[in-house]
Image: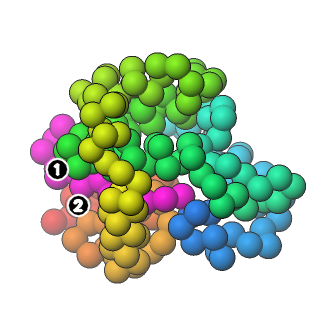
Amino acid sequence: RLISLAEQGVEVVIRPVLGGVLRIPERYRDRDELELHYFETDTQRTADYLGLPYAYPDPSPIEWAPGLIWRAKADQPRNQHLHRLFVGANRARRGLEFLDCVGRMLWDGSTPGWDKGEHLKNAMAAAGLDRDEILEANSWQSVEQDLQANNEAMHQAGHWGVPLMVYKTEPFYGQDRFDQLLWRMGRD
């Protein structure tokens, strides 16, 4: 839907942030299985509603702490790798293309073992990017600075969750707010 907006001439600014369990872990402490099950049901339902294939990535981009809900391990090699690619793509002005090609490959269930072999390299190429060049130009230390600045911008916009869309100064949190975003844009 963001691609459609961009194709209509709307400036879509992508601001990558870490997932909430990594960015604001205190908000995810003491959660229960009911919330986890609802999240799983809701994400599948939203994908079905939008006509999108969906499956949780295998392996998860986040290294989870065993036996706990919404708790991540301290070491996050897959997540750091993905965010180096994402922020690098964004710096190369191809963040939306990254989400379209790499994001779909991760979340459509078509690529178990996405972190092995040439999967990421091929998805990056489909987005018009060279994976190796992006990694070389984007150290984790520099990427962390962008992620932190984007997190601060989210809070200034009035929310902490993703996906977050902001029109003028008004935040729209969640996939289910996209139609309200369009409605608000149409009123101007």
The residue at 57%/46% (across/down) is: 77
Q: Which residue is mark 1?
A: 10
Q: Nearer the viewer, residue 55 or 69?
A: 69
Residue at the extreme right of the image, as rendered = 67
Contact? badges 1 and 2 (CB < 8 Å): yes
Residue type at mark 2 is Met
Residue 15 in the image: above or below residue 52: below
Which colour style is shown? rainbow
The Cα atoms of the two marked residues, 1 and 2, are separated by 10 Å
Residue 115 screen position, x and y as percent: 56, 30
Residue 9 forms part of the magenta stretch: yes
Earlier-in-chain disc, 1 versus 2: 1
Look at 63% across and 49% down and name the residue there: 62
- Asked whether residue 27 is in view, the answer is yes
* In magenta stretch: residue 107: no
From the top left corner, tell me how far across and down residue 108 is, in percent.
Answer: 55, 29
- Amino acid on which the number 1 mark rests in the picture: Val
Which residue is at 58% across, 63% downward?
22
> Which tag is nearer the camera, tag 1 or tag 2?
1
Instruction: Tell me where residue 78 sits by quadrant.
Output: top right
How many numbered discs, if any? Answer: 2
Location of mark 2 (residue): 185
Locate residue 98 relative to residue 39 in the image: left or right.
left
Q: Quadrant where the N terminus lies?
A: top left
| Residue 95, horizontal then vertical, whole percent | 29, 44
Residue 134, given in percent of the width and then of the height, sits at: 30, 38
| SS type, badge 1 | loop
What stretch of residues is rendered in magenta?
Answer: 1-19
The reply, left or right, for residue 131 in relation to residue 56 is: left
Q: Secondary structure at mark 2?
A: helix
Dominant SS of magenta comes to loop
Quarter of the figure with the C terminus? bottom left
